[in-house]
Image (tube, grey):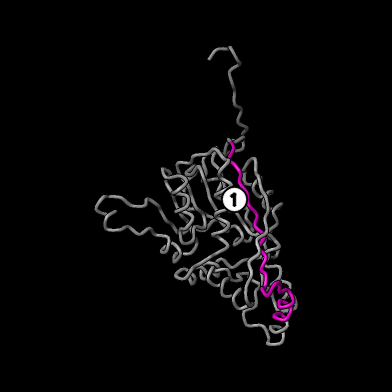
């Protein structure tokens, strides 16, 4: 699936570490609300939740409100983000012996530091789009999930930042890295062993007074180009001005649009059909009225 596309995981980690103290992601907040609303019609009460790509922990607090009895674990590739996610315990809470029970760990999504069947819910808000190929991470998610557990995720689709991509199409190198199609995500879910995947797509458009404001917003959210093929220096003055001029032609009511294609999905971990060594598992059920 990944082809010649490659993201530099070290750059991803450094970008999010650098953004940790001032981190503010309007897009992630809006997506989290949509993910939360999609849980309304799902009858599932997890006892253990993994937030993979937890960032500064905002979604962990949201999940605590919906599932107050569940054990919560946050994992992220950026250690500085995890420092921001650490819950603060006030003096009164310490005196009363109360604190926000959440475990935080630095982790690569392709090699999770958890044993099998640890969680009955896995939440991932805009993390998959930072991977070359979602398949290895999805396989890890399935491994650490209990049978009957649910994966709830959101990721970015190919139309994300299309205005910026097209504005820089003549510039040197890759200025906006590519995002994976919803159908490829679906194939990867099934390949990882998930069942009954349900996905939908939505488009969110943010608007900005100027291009510099868009770039500043992306930096604050840690969303910088991490493609291994990205140019290492600045564009030439001519190509930079040309890109700005192209973007300016897209103004609507005095604002510059930035499109984000959001892919939402959830899936379940079914009971295994084969043993780890490849033998088929046959389950017998008693006939109605037969011996128990």
Horizontal and vertical percent for residue 132? Answer: 63, 61
Q: Which residue is mark 1?
A: 138
Q: State which region is magenta.
A: 243-270
Residue lying furthest front: 253
Q: Secondary structure at mark 1?
A: helix
Relative horizontal placement of residue 171, taking residue 282 as reference (left or right): right
Horizontal and vertical percent for residue 187? Answer: 69, 48
Residue lying furthest left: 95
Which residue is drawn at the image coordinates 41% and 64% (left, top)?
83
Relative horizontal placement of residue 86, taking residue 207 as reference (left or right): left
Q: Nearer the viewer, residue 70 or 82?
A: 70
| Other residues around mark 1 within 10 Å, as few (<14) / some (14–19) / many (≥20) | many
Relative horizontal placement of residue 289, taking residue 167 as reference (left or right): left
Which residue is drawn at the image coordinates 59% and 49% (left, top)?
139
Which quarter shows the N terminus?
Answer: bottom right
Quarter where residue 277 is shown: top right
268 magenta-colored? yes
Total numbered labels placed on residues in the image: 1
Horizontal and vertical percent for residue 247? Answer: 71, 76
């Amino acid at each position: 699936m990944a082809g010649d596309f490659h993201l530099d995981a070290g750059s991803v980690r450094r970008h999010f570490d650098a953004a940790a103290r001032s981190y503010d992601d309007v897009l992630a907040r809006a997506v989290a609300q949509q993910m939360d609303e999609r849980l309304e019609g799902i009858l599932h009460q997890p006892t253990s939740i993994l937030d993979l790509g937890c960032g500064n922990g905002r979604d962990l607090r949201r999940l605590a409100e919906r599932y107050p009895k569940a054990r919560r674990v946050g994992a992220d590739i950026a250690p500085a983000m995890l420092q921001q996610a650490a819950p603060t315990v006030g003096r009164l809470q310490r005196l009363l012996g109360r604190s926000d029970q959440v475990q935080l760990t630095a982790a690569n999504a392709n090699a999770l530091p958890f044993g099998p069947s640890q969680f009955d819910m896995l939440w991932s808000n805009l993390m998959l789009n930072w991977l070359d190929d979602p398949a290895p991470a999805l396989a890890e998610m399935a491994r650490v999930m209990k049978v009957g557990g649910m994966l709830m995720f959101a990721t970015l689709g190919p139309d994300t930042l299309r205005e910026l991509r097209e504005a820089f199409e003549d510039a040197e190198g890759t200025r906006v890295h590519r995002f994976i199609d919803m159908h490829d995500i679906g194939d990867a879910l099934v390949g990882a062993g998930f069942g009954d995947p349900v996905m939908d797509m939505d488009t969110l458009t943010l608007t900005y007074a100027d291009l510099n404001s868009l770039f500043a917003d992306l930096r604050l959210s840690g969303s910088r180009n991490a493609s291994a093929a990205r140019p290492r220096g600045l564009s030439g003055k001519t190509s930079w001005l040309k890109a700005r001029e192209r973007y300016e032609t897209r103004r609507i009511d005095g604002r510059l649009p930035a499109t984000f294609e959001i892919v939402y999905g959830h899936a379940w971990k079914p009971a295994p059909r084969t043993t780890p060594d490849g033998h088929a598992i046959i389950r017998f059920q008693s006939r109605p009225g037969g011996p128990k």
